[in-house]
Image (cartoon, rainbow, N blue to C red):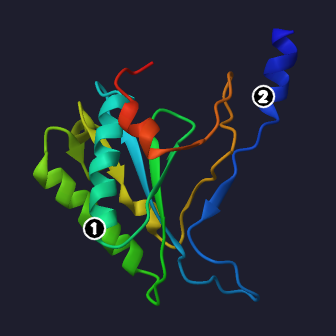
């Protein structure tokens, strides 16, 4: 049974999608969503990630956006917002400024820098997923692992209730 399960897991597809609209023709559309990928640095847990997600939610709500959370299907969380912009580079600049703001406010808990050394004991806010050339794991997508996990939407009540890594 286990061998059959491992073989079927190898056929699982990770579905990664862009943050922009698909339009007719060869060009890409404008971004219509904003994404923050919250990754756990060494020595952190999903509990710390949930606290950062809550702080990020407060800022996004204050800016008039309606954030939604998902598990990443790995160790962290993702926070999404629908957006309407005429500038394809604006979402990345906005996301970077929020990540840097949170990192400045709590440098011991958050980093906006990708370097592994910078992430020790901190949650990394991956703002660069908003680059028009990048994609992000889709909600409900399986992760291709020996024991697959799923990127799953969660409610803000579930995020708030997270108190133990398990």
**How many angstroms separate mark 1 from mark 2 (CA)?**
42 Å
* Residue hosting label 1: 62
Q: Are marks 1 and 2 in contact (CB under 8 Å)?
A: no
Across and down, in percent, residue 126 comes to 38, 53
Across and down, in percent, residue 99 comes to 27, 58
Closer to the camera in the image, 138 or 157: 157
Q: Secondary structure at mark 2?
A: helix
Q: Which residue lies at the image location 55% right of the left edge and 83% below the top edge? A: 30
Quarter of image, res 91? bottom left
Closer to the camera in the image, 57 or 95: 57
Residue found farthest to the top: 1
Across and down, in percent, residue 157 comes to 43, 40
Q: Which residue lies at the image location 45% right of the left edge and 42% below the top edge? A: 77
Q: Which residue lies at the image location 40% right of the left edge and 21% below the top edge? A: 165
Residue found farthest to the front: 157
Q: Is 125 rendered above or below residue 143?
A: below
User: Where's the N terminus, which quadrant?
Assistant: top right
Q: Which residue lies at the image location 54% right of the left edge and 70% below the top edge? A: 133
Can I make out residue 24 in this image? Answer: yes
Q: Secondary structure at mark 1?
A: helix
Q: Is 8 rendered above or below residue 32?
A: above
* Residue hosting label 2: 9
Count residues near mark 2 (Cα–Cα under 10 Å), then give few for <14, some for 14-19, many for 20+. Answer: some
The disc label shown at residue 22, or none: none
Please tell me whether mark 1 or mark 2 is closer to you in this view: 1
């Amino acid at each position: 049974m286990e061998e059959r399960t491992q073989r079927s897991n190898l056929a699982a597809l990770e579905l990664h999608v862009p943050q922009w609209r698909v339009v007719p023709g060869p060009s890409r559309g404008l971004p219509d969503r904003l994404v923050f990928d919250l990754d756990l640095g060494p020595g952190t847990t999903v509990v710390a990630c949930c606290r950062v997600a809550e702080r990020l939610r407060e800022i996004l709500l204050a800016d008039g956006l309606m954030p939604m959370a998902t598990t990443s299907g790995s160790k962290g969380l993702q926070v999404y917002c629908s957006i309407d912009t005429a500038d394809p580079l604006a979402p990345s600049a906005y996301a970077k400024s929020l990540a840097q703001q949170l990192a400045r406010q709590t440098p011991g808990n958050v980093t906006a820098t990708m370097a592994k050394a910078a992430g020790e004991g901190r949650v990394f806010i991956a703002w660069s997923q908003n680059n028009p050339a990048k994609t992000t794991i889709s909600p409900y997508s399986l992760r291709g692992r020996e024991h697959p996990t799923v990127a799953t939407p969660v409610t803000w009540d579930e995020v708030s209730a997270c108190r133990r890594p398990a």
